Image: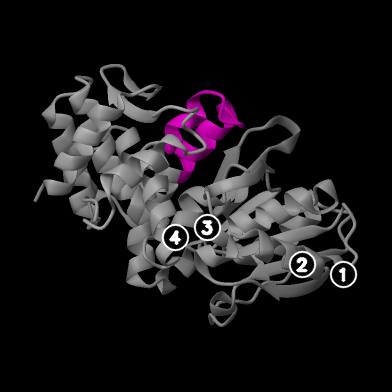
Amino acid sequence: MNVSVELGERSYDVVLGDGARHQLAELIRQRAPRARVAVIVTTPSIALQPWFEVTSGIEQHVLTVPDGEAAKALDVLEVLLEEVAQFELSRFDVLVGIGGGALTDLVGFAAATYLRGVSLVQMPTSLVGQVDAAIGGKTGVNLRSGKNLVGAFHQPIGVLCDLATIATLPERERLAGLGEVAKCWLLEGGFAAELADVSLHDLIVMSVQLKAAVVSADEQEGGRRALLNYGHTLAHALEKLALARDSDELRHGEAVAIGLAFAVRVAEALGRVDHSEVLRHDDVLEFFGLQRRIPEHFPTSSLLEAMAHDKKAHHDLTFVLAGAEGFETVHDVDPQLVSDVLERFQGEP
């Protein structure tokens, strides 16, 4: 199945299906016909997977970077670009990212900056990568001050989502990906009772179609695309604090799930929704088996400070919140109200 991201001359398809990785050579032939070299960037664990066999149809080289969030660092980016430079790529050549969301963020930013931009193919192998990170052209790396503070918009020429790779995911990675799926399901107005009849394949397609439609309408997050940040204000704060302790403590999707449960409680406290919307969120998150509470070792004061300095906060406390007219970005939310909701939220059973 193909889902199109409509961006005029820069439009591209997200290919969903078992064996999608085998379409790499044809994709390069069609979308980058002057390419002579492809540099495939992956991680050591991905390179050892039995399905890791990709052919670009042109001269190709394989480079590896660290697994997980550790890849999204300026020093890793520098090493990667120096290694890429050894192959003397031209602007017509291609970088290919094969891995999870952190990997595709890194490789996308490398493609955006090397020679001021080379062609990019994303091949996400995690659930969070396939439904979110690899689609839409948002790329970047982290600073100690926060997630994704250095980045660029750089659209790929194609995204190949091989669903066969999902079967090899560890359970924790699968659950983390479901955090972004739950976000899409909630944005689309879905209920937990409907999920019993929906396959994982259908949930992936739903999430990709939503992301593609939003990006097509608002490529650089000037309006509607901001809704895809639902749950992310608290999520990024949690990730920032967790990364300072241990890069493996909290996955992005795990943080997003907590952020979704929190955001709907902020909306309720502001009188934007009634308690039935809180229950809808909790039921969906429970169906997916996602954690819905902030661990006790995240101090409220630290979370408030981190949320206020998130790159999407615009110097105030900003949330995507549900309301009578649907979801919208709400600026300048009262810090005391947010603090009170945080305190109650951590104390809930």
Residue bearing the label numbered 3: 101
- The residue that mark 4 highlights is 243
Location of mark 1 (residue):
87
- Amino acid marked by disc 2: Val
Q: Is residue 221 above or below residue 38?
A: above
Q: Mark 3 or mark 4, which is nearer the start of the sequence?
A: 3
Q: Amino acid at mark 4?
A: Leu
With 52 as the anchor, is 189 left or right in this view?
Answer: left
> Badge 3, how many Cα within 10 Å: few under 14, some, many 20+?
many
Verify CB contact (< 8 Å) between mark 2 and mark 4.
no
Q: Are marks 1 and 2 in contact (CB under 8 Å)?
A: yes
Q: Is residue 84 magenta?
A: no
* Place of residue 193 in the rendered image (x, y in percent of width and height, measured from the top left): 16, 44
Find the distance from the CA under tag 1 to the CA under tag 2.
8 Å
Secondary structure category for the residue under label 1: loop
Q: Residues within 10 Å of mark 1 (few under 14, many from 20)?
A: few
Identify the residue under disc 2.
39
**Label 1–label 4 contact, CB within 8 A:** no
